[in-house]
């Protein structure tokens, strides 16, 4: 589905992502683990087209999409949920969701059907559909951002730290939703610090350290690996 | 009572015009966080477009539509000439390029038309007066009020009910996020400039209608008005711009009624000192805009 | 060493222009060179603030006006004073000081006005800073336009003693170059330039940035005031519209095209734009004299300057001389030659 090879992302002189290669298959849930500052978010932003890689290539369904703008990536079916959880605070919940379907705005009936689907998946959002998104709680905002990303009917969903700063019960809910989304057949690339949770639901996992891939294997094998902790702490 | 009606009409017609001017500036600032110094020239361009079609057999409304259309085109041109090439580089660069573009347009008017005032065609209805509750007032003032109500309603509908409007409001808070939903950045920005041109063009018809002619420097006063109104109302809030416009009109009208003649000359100094004080007290303006965002 | 080299090169350049023209020049050449030197003082004044703090200021030309009017008020000969400024306040109406002192005092009062009013503005950055400085210009302009007792209102004020010669203007230009260089390399200048690139980091280093900006702003206003007074004593009559957006545009254009971050850039931009301006003015005059077009050609100069600014900012946002002063360039050139030999 998506194929990253030799990717490098720079902020001025700092190389946040160095020579990273990974792939996500059709319908696969792949997680990227790593400590703060390991370059996970930069990697995801580069895949979404929001950062331009200084080196390396990005292929989507065998097509070279390196250096595409974020708008173009969305149209190709790549939806991004950034860690900053950017709801549009003065837009209502339903406006946020409708904007998620910007690229398919002509297909009114399909969009409306998806909107109802999201409301069934996230009943809390339905209750608050006329409320300004800025007034939602952190967990509700996270659900809104995921639902909004789903509104563009993506082939692959990039999720950046969906559990960040949320209460444990909410985190459980969010992870359940990710599993449900996977069941619909889309590919998911999940960046997480909460390794235990992420490994429970993922098919495969990569571990990033200091901008590089330090390990990769099936989720089960990574979960077993005794030196995971060491890699995390940068030992 | 008569005085009150007089004051009300003066205030509302001035406030409507000010509010539209401020909106035209804020719609661009809200999305890009960049001030368009060439904004006043949109009004100038409308005036010269009217002047150029003066004397043709066209009905006035067609001439006016043509002039507003030229303002919209100039708005979009501002984006291409002054903003797009330097947008990503620095805030200062854009201020300078838009200032340069403003000078360019003014001097083009000097060079190709004339430094002297040029008459513009006005419909007869602009020069008529009516009596309301014992007050004799120009019909033009009432038309200004009506037009600003219509434009504000249209603008509200555009921003609340259309996809492009919602996308523009979204882009004003999180530009990159909006792009990651597939909202094309350049289209949004060009639309903002087009709307800016539309608002300026419409308001220009009435603003110039008071004066009856156009000169190259005509845009400065509207630019200043838009500055003050947006600063008072909150530099990034659309409602704030409207509020600021009416508030400024209220201050101006009140000063006109109350200040003695020799102090009235300093009115601009008073209002601009007010701007400085407000910005010092609240750098974001009186009404806070939506949460912080970033440019690209 | 390299800073001294920069100073020597730039001062040498001014000296060559002045002596060359004094020896051989026509009156027209002297006029252009004098104008150039006055513009140098103004542009360098703006460079001191904008180049170091990175903040655009529109207020600069307002301070130029303050300098010109202060000096005018105190130096117009008494026998002309009652005609030029009939309503002048009695306290100053009978004081006549030397125009040289007037120029310095013009700068001093401009600096004092800046010092008194601008401190709170220095906290602001980006759009808020620019709009306040623009508002500042409008306030100063409105006051000049309507404070008839001191400025003769919107009418032309005349009768200033004509003392600005080419050597005097060149002398002040040289002082401005040295001041701008010293300020740039001083502790204040270095900290300010650090804040320009990263405000938070410079603040974390313990630099009180608003205070540093304030100092730069005062120095900038001082030079603007001196430049304004020099100009006043050169043209001997002016009205408030000389200190508004058109002049702001020209000074800003010179700085932006040359490179606001370097003193060399400011000097180069001033020279370049002055020469281009004179060439274009001559062209305009020529076109008008042969009456090629049915109406007079005006505004062409500004149109071309505006286009040059937009093109420059799109292609080279730092101007012609973005980062390296001429001294550095020369030193590098010598080092390079040593290596290759």
Image (cartoon, grey):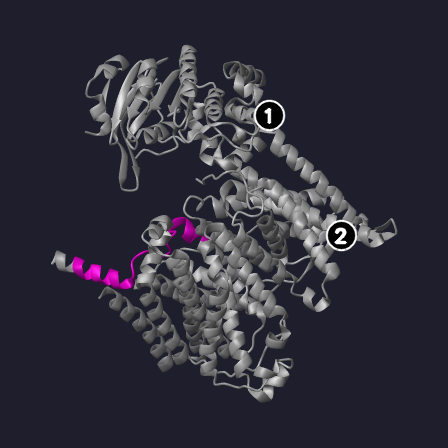
The reply to whether residue C321 is visible in this rendering is: no
Position in image of residue C110 (x %, y %): 48, 71
Confirm whether the magenta stretch covers residue C316.
yes
Task: Measure the alpha-carbon separation of dots 1 and 2.
Answer: 38 Å
Q: Which residues are magenta?
A: C310-336
Describe the element under mark 2 as helix, strand or loop. Answer: helix
The reply to whether residue C79 is visible in this rendering is: yes
- Other-residue count near label 2 (Cα within 10 Å), few / some / many at <14 / 14–19 / ≥20: some
Badges 1 and 2, same chain: no
- What residue would you read off at disc 1? A130
Q: Indicate the quadrant where residue B27 lies.
A: top right
Q: Which residue corresponds to the image point at 65% horizontal and 45% vertical from the top-left?
A: B243
Confirm whether the magenta stretch covers residue A157.
no
Position in image of residue B87 (x %, y %): 45, 44
Q: Is residue A161 above or below residue B85?
A: above
- Looking at the image, the residue that sits furthest to the bottom is C79
- What residue would you read off at disc 2? B10
Q: Identify the subunit bearing mark 1.
A: A
């Amino acid at each position: 589905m998506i194929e990253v090879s030799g990717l490098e992302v720079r902020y001025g002189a700092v190389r946040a992502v160095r020579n990273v290669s990974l792939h996500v298959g059709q319908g696969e849930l792949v997680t990227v683990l790593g400590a703060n500052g390991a370059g996970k978010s930069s990697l995801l932003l580069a895949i979404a087209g929001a950062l331009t890689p200084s080196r390396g290539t990005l292929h989507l369904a065998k097509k070279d999409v390196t250096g595409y703008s974020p708008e173009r990536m969305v149209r190709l079916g790549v939806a991004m949920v950034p860690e900053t959880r950017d709801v549009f605070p003065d837009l209502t919940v339903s406006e946020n969701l409708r904007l998620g379907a910007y690229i398919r705005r002509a297909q009114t009936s399909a969009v409306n059907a998806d909107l109802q689907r999201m409301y069934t998946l996230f009943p809390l959002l339905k209750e608050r559909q006329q409320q300004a998104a800025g007034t939602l709680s952190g967990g509700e905002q996270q659900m809104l951002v995921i639902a909004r990303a789903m509104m563009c009917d993506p082939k692959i969903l990039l999720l950046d730290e969906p559990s960040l700063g949320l209460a444990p019960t909410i985190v459980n809910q969010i992870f359940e939703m990710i599993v449900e989304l996977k069941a619909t057949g889309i590919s998911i690339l999940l960046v997480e610090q909460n390794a235990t949770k992420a490994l429970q639901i993922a098919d495969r996992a990569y571990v990033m350290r200091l901008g590089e891939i330090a390990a990769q294997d099936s989720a089960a094998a990574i979960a077993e690996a005794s030196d995971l902790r060491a890699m995390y702490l940068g030992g | 009572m008569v005085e009150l009606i007089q004051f009300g009409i003066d205030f509302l017609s001035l406030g409507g015009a000010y509010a539209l001017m401020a909106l035209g500036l804020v719609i661009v600032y809200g999305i890009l966080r960049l001030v368009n110094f060439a904004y006043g020239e949109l009004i100038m361009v409308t005036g010269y477009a009217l002047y150029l079609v003066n004397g043709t057999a066209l009905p006035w409304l067609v001439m006016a539509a043509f002039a507003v259309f030229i303002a919209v085109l100039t708005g979009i041109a501002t984006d291409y000439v002054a903003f797009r090439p330097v947008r990503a580089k620095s805030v200062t660069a854009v201020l300078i390029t838009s200032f340069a573009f403003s000078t360019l347009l003014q001097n083009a008017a000097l060079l190709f038309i004339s430094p002297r005032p040029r008459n513009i065609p006005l419909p007869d209805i602009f020069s008529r007066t009516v009596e309301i509750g014992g007050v004799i007032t120009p019909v033009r003032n009432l038309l200004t009020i009506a037009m600003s109500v219509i434009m504000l309603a249209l603008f509200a509908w555009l921003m609340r009910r259309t996809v492009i409007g919602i996308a523009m409001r979204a882009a004003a808070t999180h530009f990159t996020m909006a792009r990651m939903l597939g909202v094309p950045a350049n289209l949004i920005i060009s639309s903002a400039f087009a709307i800016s041109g539309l608002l300026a063009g419409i308001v220009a018809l009435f603003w110039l209608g008071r004066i009856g002619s156009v000169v190259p420097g005509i845009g400065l006063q509207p630019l200043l008005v838009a500055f003050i109104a947006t600063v008072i109302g909150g530099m990034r809030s659309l409602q704030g711009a409207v509020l600021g416009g009416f508030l400024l009109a209220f201050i101006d009208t009140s000063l006109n009624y109350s200040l003695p003649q020799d102090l009235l000359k300093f009115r601009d100094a008073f209002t601009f000192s007010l701007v400085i004080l407000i910005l010092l007290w609240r750098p974001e303006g009186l009404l806070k805009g939506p949460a912080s965002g970033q440019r690209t | 060493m390299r800073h001294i080299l920069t100073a020597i090169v730039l001062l040498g350049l001014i000296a060559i222009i002045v002596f060359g023209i004094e020896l051989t020049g026509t009156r027209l050449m002297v006029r252009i060179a004098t104008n150039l030197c006055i513009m140098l003082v103004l542009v360098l004044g703006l460079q001191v603030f904008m180049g170091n703090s990175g903040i655009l200021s529109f207020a600069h030309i307002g301070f130029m006006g303050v300098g010109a009017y202060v000096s005018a008020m105190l130096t117009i000969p008494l026998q002309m004073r009652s005609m030029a400024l009939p309503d002048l306040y009695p306290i100053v109406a009978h004081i006549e000081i030397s125009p040289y002192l007037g120029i310095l005092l013009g700068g001093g009062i401009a600096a004092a006005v800046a010092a008194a009013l601008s401190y709170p503005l220095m906290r602001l950055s980006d759009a808020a800073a620019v709009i306040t400085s623009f508002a500042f210009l409008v306030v100063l302009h409105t006051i000049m336009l309507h404070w008839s007792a001191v400025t003769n209102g919107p009418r032309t004020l005349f009768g200033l003693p004509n003392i600005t010669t080419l050597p005097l203007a060149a002398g002040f230009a040289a002082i401005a170059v040295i001041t701008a260089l010293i300020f740039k390399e001083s502790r204040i200048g270095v900290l300010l330039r650090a804040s320009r690139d990263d405000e938070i980091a410079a603040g974390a280093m313990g630099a009180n940035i608003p205070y540093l900006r304030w100092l730069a702003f005062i120095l900038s206003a001082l030079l603007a005031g001196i430049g304004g007074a020099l100009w006043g004593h050169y043209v001997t009559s002016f009205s408030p519209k000389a200190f508004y957006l058109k002049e702001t545009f020209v000074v800003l254009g010179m700085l932006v095209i040359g490179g606001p971050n370097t003193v060399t850039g400011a000097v180069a931009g001033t020279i370049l734009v002055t020469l281009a301006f004179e060439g274009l003015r001559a062209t305009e005059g020529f076109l008008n004299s042969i009456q090629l077009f049915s109406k007079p050609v005006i505004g062409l100069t500004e149109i071309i300057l505006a286009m040059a600014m937009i093109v420059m900012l799109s292609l080279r946002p730092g101007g012609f001389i973005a980062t390296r002063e001429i001294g550095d360039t020369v030193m590098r050139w010598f080092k390079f030659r040593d290596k290759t030999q």
